[in-house]
Image (cartoon, grey):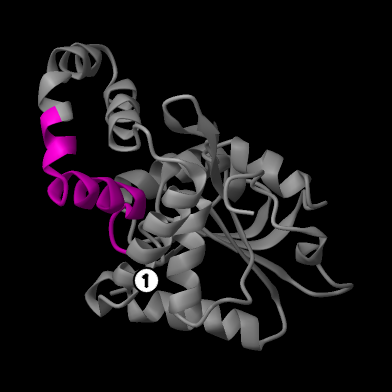
Amino acid sequence: MTTGEAVEGAETAPEDGARVVLFDFDGVLIRGDSFTLFMRARYKRSLGRKLLALLTSPVWLVLAIFSRKLAAHFLVRVALLFVGAARYEQMATAFGVELARTPRLFPREGILALRRHVHAGERVLVVTACEKTLARAILDELGLAGVPVLASTFRPGWLGMRVRRHNIGARKLVSLAEIGLTRWDVAYSDSWRDIPMLRPATEPMMVNASPRTCKRVERALGRAVGRVAWY
């Protein structure tokens, strides 16, 4: 179910004795922000959406003065105006497949690391702020269909798709708790925004993060973090 809750199912619960390994997605398994790439492509390929963005520019430019997040949210609403659930699923899946077929977007070392954890019999989950349909399509096309995804979700609204849950920061802990996970062994991230997810990990790992970001995370956790560079 692509527009429902972030929880993918009880099958994601860890087996007895199995290590649990969490991967953030954007910036870790894919270079850049996958949903932003989706929205940019949506505008690039649709003259109508470009015109809507232009006509509504006084609104989102004012919003941007106060919050880039609010402005971005507004532009997402414009991009998905009058898009229903079935059409959204079709669009997001097709774009996810397209992205997955662009090898330069995916750090080889990151994908190999995930596969190694899976082959070691560990319980691997991708926990991401990316929308679920898009993230699922990308991972499936990469041959990672067996890896569960806890992600942001949308719901149909009167004027198109709307955010049901933005799976970011502390929200990731809610998604994990809903499948019975409150502690895990390893967590990979590139961002300080994942401090809530990194804190319970026995091995918090920062991926391609700047020294400044790593120090910020270490101050918040009160301990050292592992650091890896994936290219």
Q: Is residue 31 magenta?
A: yes
- Between residues 56 and 18, which one lies in front from this camera angle? 56
Q: Is residue 223 left or right of residue 137?
A: right
Residue 25 visible in the snapshot? no
Q: Is residue 44 left or right of residue 72?
A: left
Answer above or below: position of 13 versus 145: above
Q: Quadrant of the C terminus?
A: bottom left
Q: Residue 117, position in %: x, y?
A: 61, 80
Q: Which residue is mark 1?
A: 97
Q: Is residue 22 left or right of residue 54?
A: right
Q: Looking at the image, which residue sits at the far bottom?
A: 119
**Going 64% across and 54% down the picture, which residue do you hit?**
1
**Going 79% across and 75% down the picture, which residue do you hit?**
18
Secondary structure type for disc 1: helix
Mark 1: amino acid:
Val
Q: Looking at the image, which residue sits at the far right?
A: 16
Q: Residue 51, position in %: x, y?
A: 11, 31
| Span highlighted in magenta in the image | 30-51
